[in-house]
């Protein structure tokens, strides 16, 4: 029994410590994702140790301490995404349709053919903007009916799992499709005009993940997030960045993006809102995101029902309220963060100047 618990303890400890290594290889970065699951396993293992080990032996206490530290480390990363943490984004005080922006982000999964389910959600929730990821020419044709009510569009149908479409009820200005880091991975950038006449700079992104079937390392994904973050940090205008980041909310890379961009995460203090994997509830984590500048407060954030994809759609309503939002506090970068960001973009020969700046 002791040997079994020893092996389990060191497995949990390694899985906890490995992501602290900044190695970008997928085999290391993949441990950024299942922190909630690892916290659950560490808590279960700790209970088993306390019940079954001979606690009069120093070696037994050694295992208990290692497991306890592993659990504490996992909780440090994930607790901000629970209701016990202070909210990073304030709740909107009152409805104001003229200054409210509703965005529905949906990774549709290219081979998925349940377009009617997504159309039904659009009809039900009436988003101002629909962003689809992994949408190819078939999906473009199925969603064409939306253009009657959402006539402002940006289209980039691809059959490589990185197609992207935007449908908007609100006017889009200076729209642009870019391939910031990888030649087959697009992003979209525009200025959306609210009903009030105010304009918001929006960036829709879907960088490729580190995985054995795509990129061996996370450097391409990380570089795209860093240069977009650096670009929006220079803006004094309202900004939103949304999409499937192929990264979890609590990872070092997403935290780095939040630090260099100065954007806020409405999940903090509210919940995980895990959007992937839709079919396997024990293996879920938040991959689809919306970050915004302090010009906004939050009306609502919702994970919508499955449409047959491996991702749940993600619906966010924010209200432009710069006076109320001005004292909201984002994460602050330090010297090490700036140095790490510089190393990431240098590795990919990328620059924030590669990112369009609509409205600037």
Image (cartoon, rainbow, N blue to C red):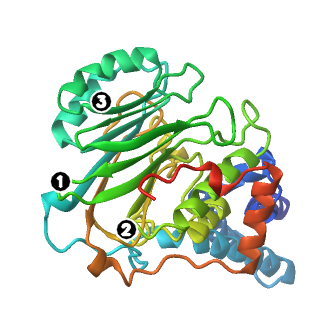
Q: Is residue 354 left or right of residue 294?
A: right
Task: Assign a secondary structure to mark 1.
Answer: loop
From this view, report whether residue 65 is shown above or below residue 219: below
User: Label 3 to label 1, Cα distance in Å?
Assistant: 25 Å
| Residue sitting at x 50%, y 54% | 357
Asked if residue 255 is positioned above or below residue 303 in the image, the reply reads below
Q: How many marks?
A: 3
Q: Earlier in the sequence, mark 2 or mark 1?
A: 1
User: Which quadrant is the N terminus positioned in?
Assistant: bottom right
Residue 309 picture quarter: top left
Q: Give the label, 2 or 1, closer to the camera.
A: 1
Question: Which dot, 3 or 1, sits closer to the camera?
Answer: 1
Mark drawn on residue 195: 1
Q: Quadrant of residue 187?
A: top right
Q: CA distance from mark 3 to mark 2?
A: 25 Å
- Tell whether label 1 touches label 2 (CB within 8 Å): no
Disc number placed over residue 118 in the picture, else none: 3
| Residue found 26% across the figure and 72% down from its top | 321
Q: In what element is the residue under mark 3?
A: helix
Q: Which residue is mark 2?
A: 270
Q: Position of residue 226 (x, y in %)?
A: 65, 58
User: Which residue occupies the foreground of this view, 87 or 336?
Assistant: 336
Question: x and y percent of residue 268 in the render?
Answer: 44, 69
Residue 172 as seen in the image, left or right of residue 251:
left
Horizontal and vertical percent position of residue 25: 81, 47
In-front residue for pair 213/349: 349
Please tell me how crowded label 3 is: few (under 14), some (14-19), or many (20+) other residues with Cα within 10 Å: many
Q: First in sequence: mark 3 or mark 1?
A: 3
Can residue 33 be seen here? The reply is: no
């Amino acid at each position: 029994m002791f040997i079994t618990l020893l092996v389990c303890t060191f497995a949990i400890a390694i899985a906890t410590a490995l992501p602290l290594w900044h190695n970008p290889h997928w085999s290391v970065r993949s441990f950024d994702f299942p922190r909630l699951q690892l916290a659950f396993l560490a808590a279960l293992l700790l209970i088993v140790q306390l019940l079954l080990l001979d606690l009069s032996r120093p070696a037994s206490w050694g295992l208990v301490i290692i497991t306890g530290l592993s659990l504490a480390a996992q909780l440090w990363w994930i607790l901000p995404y629970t209701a016990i943490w202070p909210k990073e984004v304030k709740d909107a005080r009152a409805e104001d349709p003229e200054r409210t922006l509703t965005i529905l982000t949906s990774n549709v999964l290219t081979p998925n053919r349940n377009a009617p389910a997504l159309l039904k959600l659009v009809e039900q929730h009436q988003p101002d903007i629909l962003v689809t990821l992994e949408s190819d020419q078939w999906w473009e044709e199925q969603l064409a009916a939306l253009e009657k009510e959402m006539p402002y569009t940006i289209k980039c149908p691809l059959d490589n799992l990185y197609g992207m479409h935007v449908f908007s009820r609100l006017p889009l200005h200076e729209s642009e499709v870019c391939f910031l880091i990888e030649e087959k991975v697009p992003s979209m950038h525009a200025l959306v005009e609210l009903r009030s006449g105010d304009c918001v700079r929006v960036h829709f992104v879907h960088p490729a993940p580190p995985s054995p079937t795509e990129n061996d390392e996370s450097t391409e994904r990380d570089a795209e997030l860093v240069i977009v973050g650096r670009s929006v940090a220079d803006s004094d205008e309202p900004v939103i960045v949304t999409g499937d980041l192929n990264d979890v909310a609590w990872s070092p890379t997403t935290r780095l993006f939040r630090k260099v961009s100065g954007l806020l995460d409405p999940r903090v203090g509210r919940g995980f809102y895990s959007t992937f994997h839709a079919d396997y509830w024990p293996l879920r984590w938040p991959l689809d995101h919306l970050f915004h500048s302090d010009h906004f407060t939050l009306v609502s954030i919702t994970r919508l029902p499955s449409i047959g994809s491996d991702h749940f759609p993600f619906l966010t309503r924010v209200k432009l309220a710069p006076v109320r939002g001005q004292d909201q506090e984002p994460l602050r970068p330090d010297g090490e963060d700036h140095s790490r960001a510089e190393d990431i973009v240098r590795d990919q020969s990328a620059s924030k100047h590669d990112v369009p700046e609509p409205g600037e």
